[in-house]
Amino acid sequence: MAKDLYINGEKKTPKNKVKCPGWCDWEAEVKRVINEKDQEMVNGLTEEQKKKLKKNRGVDFKR
Amino acid sequence: MSVNLNKPPKNDSGAPISAPTFEDTDGLAPQWEGHLYTAVAGATNIFDELVTTEKRLRGGWYELLNDKAVVGDKVEFSVVDKNDVLGLFALLGLTVGVDVLELRKYVANEYVNPNNMTRQSFIGNSAFLVVAGLYMRSIYDSEGTENVVFKANTLAYE
């Protein structure tokens, strides 16, 4: 008989867990999401703020 | 060809090749994050912690806090995507709310030692980037008849 399942202390019905297949480069997707968020943040800055960010972080808004 | 072991190896451009170490954290600060959990006896217990900021996960540890564990209990740790944060669900034919995508299981079938209540650590030789919206999933699979209290800590850089 299958064991009961608790998620964060509450009894739940199991969801379908799927393992990321070997060909699926999820780490690249993580970097893509971060780059997109960075770009969104940079888009909201003034030119002056962009210059300062580049100077402080030594990056050109891309990782 | 003779090799001088006193000189560091060099790349094609003549620059010395060196391996980065964790002495240099690239300006990031360590963050130890602890969670206190109670695992229901005789059940599979999942504890999901939402990642709220981008960070580099390096390792962690767990520690039994009461003496209710039994031989056969085990701990696991993984990073999962429940809400299609990475946009992979469509590619894999998954549905948000129905499926959980396990990106990587870092700790599998770690059978706890009921007679040893000291911490058990896991430290990677690299750091793994995780992004806000993903979940760090700890699992305690209990075989016993009494609830087990334990704490799980993660070590990350952010």
Image (tube, coloured by chain):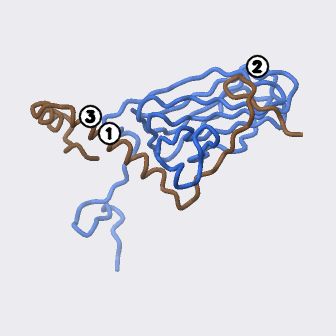
Secondary structure at numbered mark 3 = helix
Residue at position x 84%, y 21% from top? B146
> To which quarter of the image does residue B77 belong?
top right
Is mark 2 in CB contact (under 8 Å) with mark 3? no
User: Could you tell me how far apart the alpha carbons at marks 2 and 1 are, in whole angstroms?
Assistant: 39 Å
Give the label on residue A41, or none: 3
Is mark 1 in CB contact (under 8 Å) with mark 3? no
Q: Label 1: few (<14), some or many (≥20) within 10 Å?
A: few
Amino acid type, residue under disc 3 in the picture = Met
Residue on which disc 2 sits: B66
User: Could you tell me how far apart the alpha carbons at marks 1 and 3 are, in whole angstroms?
Assistant: 21 Å
Q: Position of residue B17 (x, y in %)?
A: 31, 59
Q: Label 2: few (<14), some or many (≥20) within 10 Å?
A: few
Give the label on residue B56, or none: none
**Does B6 appear above or below B32?**
below
Residue at position x 85%, y 39% from top? A2
Q: Label 3: few (<14), some or many (≥20) within 10 Å?
A: few
Q: Colour of chain A?
A: brown
Would residue B50 be seen by someone viewing this image from the given angle? yes
Going by the image, does B91 lie left or right of A9?
A: left
